[in-house]
Image (cartoon, grey):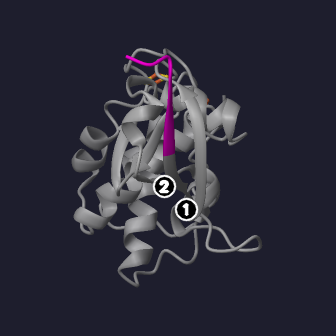
Amino acid sequence: MPSSVPISVSVNGRPYTREVEARLLLSDFIRQELGLTGTHVGCEHGVCGACTVLMDGEAVRSCLLFAAQADGAELRTVEGMAPSEDQLHPLQTAFRDAHGLQCGFCTPGILMTMIPFLEQNPHPSEDDVRLAISGNLCRCTGYANIVRAVMLAAERSRGGPGGDPTIEPRGVSAATVATAASVEAH
Ligand code: FES
Ligand code: FES
């Protein structure tokens, strides 16, 4: 097998053609070759979910793929979420409004995991969301507010009353909100 291979990918709508080492991980390609450091690397063996990106619309762990395997693919990273420089993606807005992040290390991976999840599940229950993020580790243990943020984004995407972040989104129990508030207070 040659030590380097040519690849062509689209990342956030922009085409790139590069010669890469055959063993180069996709996560390292994205971060080091393309400078898109919003994709984080935690465990580097498929456990934490921090490196999640979209490949042809599906959430994948970029630390488990070689860059060469992405040849011809359309990739989307957290840098490509927002529709414009002065506008956030609705999920990003919901995470901001519902305090869905603390240090933010896990956030890009969770956001990229939630994009296809919400596309396929526009009416998720809180349990659905918990299951969907079960492969994403948050070292700040901010799960209560992460779930709340995803529920808020889902509610807003359905035209619900979530425009006011103080309004409790449907499906989020008072207990969850109380837990989230207590987490924030510590
Ligand atoms: S860095 Fe890829 S799953 Fe942890
Ligand atoms: S917000 Fe810190 S790791 Fe999740």
Magenta segment range? Answer: 1-7
Question: Residue at (73%, 39%) from the top-left corner?
Answer: 35
Is 43 on the left or on the right of 171, as rendered?
A: right
Q: Where, quadrant-wise, is the C terminus in this rendering? A: top right
Is residue 40 part of the magenta span, yes or no?
A: no
Question: Residue at (42%, 50%) from the top-left corner?
Answer: 54
Tell which of 26 and 38 is nearer to you. Answer: 26
Secondary structure under tag 2 reads: helix
Q: Label 1 belongs to which residue?
A: 94
Is 115 on the left or on the right of 180, as rendered?
A: left
Return the disc, 1 or 2, that comes first in the chain's sequence.
1
Question: Residue at (55%, 78%) from the top-left corner?
Answer: 163
Place of residue 128 in the rendered image (x, y in percent of width and height, measured from the top left): 22, 49
**Residue 59 drawn above or below residue 183:** below
Tell which of 48 and 103 is nearer to you. Answer: 48
Q: Where, quadrant-wise, is the N terminus in this rendering? A: top left
Most extreme residue toward the front is: 2
Amino acid type at image mark 2: Ala
Place of residue 162 in the rendered image (x, y in percent of width and height, measured from the top left): 49, 74
Q: Are marks 1 and 2 in contact (CB under 8 Å)?
A: yes
Q: Label 2 belongs to which residue?
A: 149
Amino acid type at image mark 1: Ala
Residue 30, can we see it? yes
Q: State the CA–CA distance, disc 1 to disc 2.
A: 5 Å
Q: Quadrant of residue 143?
A: top left
